[in-house]
Amino acid sequence: MKNGTYSTFSFSASEERINKLINGLRIGILLKGPKSEILFSNKAALEMLGLTEEGLHEKSFCNTKWDVIHEDGSPFPEDQYPFRKAIETKRTVRNVIMGIYRPSLKDRVWMQVNAEPLIDEEGEVKEVICSFSDITERKAVEEKLTSLYQSLESRALELATSNNDLQRFVHFATHDLQEPLRMVSSFTQLLKKKYEAQLDDQAIEYINYAVDGATRMKKLILDLLEYSKFSSNREVFTQTDMNKVIKDACKNLHEEITDNKVELDVPVLPVVRGKSLLITQLVENLIGNAIKYRSERKPLIKIRCDENEDHYLFSFSDNGIGIDKKYSDKIFILFQRLHSGSENNESTGVGLAICKKIVELHNGTIWVESEEGKGSNFYFTIAKN
């Protein structure tokens, strides 16, 4: 090798091995002189730059045809090139990302570049070894991931904004709707009371329908408001004694349990980690549901719990009217009502949707196994962690 030229040597056996090693590398190697002229290149460098030995020989890498850019797309000034910085500072420069346009292939590649200055006896930079690797594929993946992340961020912001708007809408709508419903119910009952003697049975029946409809609508609004609260629930997870939860739920349902002579079969239950108020509401909804859809038999509700490695599995079994198997997946959908008979027309189809949301907040799942006329078995899990 001569200064400023590229030459082919008659290598000795040792030099031949070194030559094979250098040309076998998957990393590009350039040897540059102090005037940025290229003195040597290995095969990987030629392939990465899309040039032949003749095309690269004695050429300056500072040629404007390379159109080098930073990662943000801005021009890469020549005085910031790694080999220039190595000459200026006489120190190693590492891991500089450069976007290089290849004139021969008319495309751009991304390189991760290092520069190592070779210092002579007088302390001056004699030559600079530049090593670089093609990271174009990695950059493409990074850009795609960045794009996806930004898209997810944008979508999350949209959902958060939409959710906040929905929360405000539900809050105002439910409160604003309750007043006209109260007026409809009150004035309809006043109408019945004042003119009942002048109305026939059919008119009285129509008035009763209107009052019942207003009452059900009010309950639906209150249930919808309750359902909407879960996304903004701030209660922290604590150690929750399920025995106390059952006791509190039964206390809240004391009248229904007493009036219907409900028998509860409950063993000693574990302490779980969760949001106690929500779990109490979950249990109350399941017990209340079993009472609401009781059969002619004396209501019997059995509660059981099995401990698994990473969760607790609870079951609530009843001897009520049961559910057709084809509706097993639908009953947890908001506003889904399967029993439309007059004895159950107080249902709004929100209770089990609330149960599902509570269970999901505890990293669990809920499902039902049931058959018409043979009762229902509701199962849900609560994660230990």
Image (tube, rainbow, N blue to C red):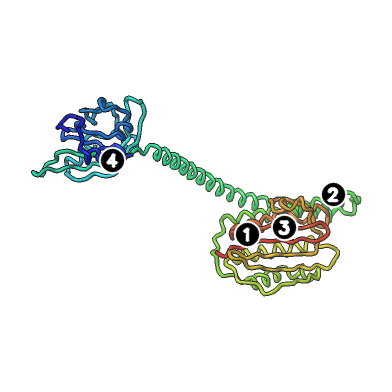
* Left or right: 382 as drawn, with respect to 193: left
Q: Are marks 3 and 2 in contact (CB under 8 Å)?
A: no
Kind of element beneath mark 2: helix
Say whether residue 311 is left or right of residue 187. left
Q: Amino acid at mark 4?
A: Leu
- Closer to the chain start, of discs 1 and 3, is 1
Mark nearer the N terminus (1 vs 4): 4
In the rendered image, which residue does mark 4 sit on? Answer: 21
User: Which mark is first along the chain, 2 or 3?
Assistant: 2
Mark 2 or 1, which is nearer the eye? 1
Residue 11 is marked as: none
Q: Which tag, 3 or 4, sits closer to the chain's start?
A: 4
In terms of secondary structure, where does tag 3 sit?
Answer: strand
For marks 2 and 4, the one nearer the N-term is 4
Q: Nearer the viewer, mark 1 or mark 4?
A: 4
Residue 182 location (% of width, % of height): 72, 54
Visible residue check, residue 357? yes
Q: Residues within 10 Å of mark 4 (few under 14, many from 20)?
A: few
Residue 9 image offset from top left, x and y in percent: 20, 32
In the image, residue 29 sits, relative to residue 258, either above or below, namely above
Kind of element beneath mark 4: helix
Residue at 20%, 28% (x, y): give it: 58
Q: Nearer the viewer, residue 314 or 5?
A: 5
Disc 3 to disc 4: CB gap under 8 Å: no
Q: Which residue is mark 1?
A: 359
User: Label 1 to label 4, Cα distance in Å?
Assistant: 62 Å
